[in-house]
Amino acid sequence: MPFSPVDLKLLATLVPVNALSAEHLRKLADKAVIEDLPSGHVLFEEGSTDSDAFYVLAGDVALSSKKGAASRTVSGASEEAKYPLANLKPRQYTGKTRTATRILHVDSQYLDTLLTWDQVAGIEVTEFEGDASDTAWMRRVLESKALLRLPAANIQQLFTRFEEVPMKAGQIIIRQGDKGDYYYVIKQGRCRVVQKPGEQQKMVALADLAEGDGFGEQALLSDAPRNATIAALSDGALMRLAKADFDKLLKEPLLEQVSDKEAMTRVQAGAGLIDVRLESEYRRASLKGSINIPLAQLRQKAGSLDAGRQYIVYCDTGRRSGAAAFLLSERGFNVALLKDGINALRKASPSTG
């Protein structure tokens, strides 16, 4: 029967869990499971590619192979029990309890992600010259859930490509209607996002941004003009990333594109469909079962989505949905982008409204 929460001191005795930072040790503890299992329970089969890492806390687990690898038993009190049980994938052994056994298991992919994040973050922040205020923005950027999905090499390169630029109170950083050229992160100071909905309408304040917040990604993702103006509310400094580096290091690794057939398969398995076009476009033609959250409203409405569900976002061409997928990825959602937009999926699903 599962036990919760998992003791942090216990986790800290296991390898390579013991290399995690205190923050990530707590995150892993939230997802770790301890179970008491009877004798004869099969943990994994030889040849399987499951994502679990098993640790023997008490009792005995027999490891056997049909391919000639030497059989052995791992006991909870042994030194070997500090390491994940026969963790090479595909599995080279079948693991089966010999006695009543207490097992701790965690998602090995999640563990590896946390280890990568910690080690890369430590290297980058400590190698960056400057005082605590110089590195604080880096730590805040590294807290982004989207970065957990990036290859380690990309994170390492990311901070070497950022360029620092000063900002003055009242300065226009990006202007609505201009072409996108940089992605920005606020290092020091505050900014305000404003938008002019129409030619004859006044500017409307949408949001205030603080240190560690990023902006400017939508125009880079969609290749569309800037959809808002962002002005500095105070003196400070910005870190900016050129479009070419943004595309290579952030956009390409984070945006998973799926074909029409793959999208339909995932929807049938429970994935949600989000149409990020305007309401007027959605009313005229949309995919059956989809919900409409226009791109401009997605930041405000992301909290209403199910964090445990995968989503497939779409528009007409893939440009707006690319920006939507990136935004949701930043917030930790499992999201994919419909390749080539609604026209591709309408061929596979003729039931459009």
Image (cartoon, rainbow, N blue to C red):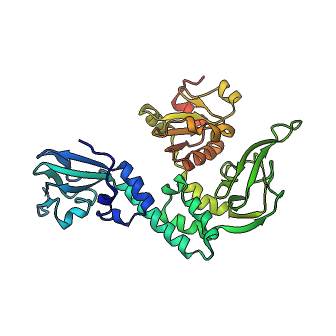
Q: Residue at x 70, y 53 (%)?
A: 216
Expressed as whole percent of the image width and height from the top left, the position of residue 2 reads: 27, 43
Expressed as whole percent of the image width and height from the top left, the position of residue 319 reads: 65, 45
For this rendering, which residue is in front, 281 or 137? Answer: 137
Q: Residue at x 20, y 49 (%)?
A: 43
For this rendering, which residue is in front, 11 or 247? Answer: 11
Left or right, 16 with respect to 134, comes to left
For this rendering, which residue is in front, 36 or 16? Answer: 36
Q: Image height check: is 196 above or below 69?
A: above
Q: Residue at x 11, y 46 (%)?
A: 39
Left or right, 47 with respect to 201, comes to left
Q: Image height check: is 25 above or below 275?
A: below
Expressed as whole percent of the image width and height from the top left, the position of residue 24 reads: 43, 58
**On-image quarter of the C terminus:** top right
* Quadrant housing residue 205: top right
Expressed as whole percent of the image width and height from the top left, the position of residue 38 reads: 14, 44
**Does residue 229 show up?**
yes
For this rendering, which residue is in front, 217 or 300? Answer: 300
Residue at the right extreme of this rendering: 200
Left or right, 100 with respect to 163, comes to left
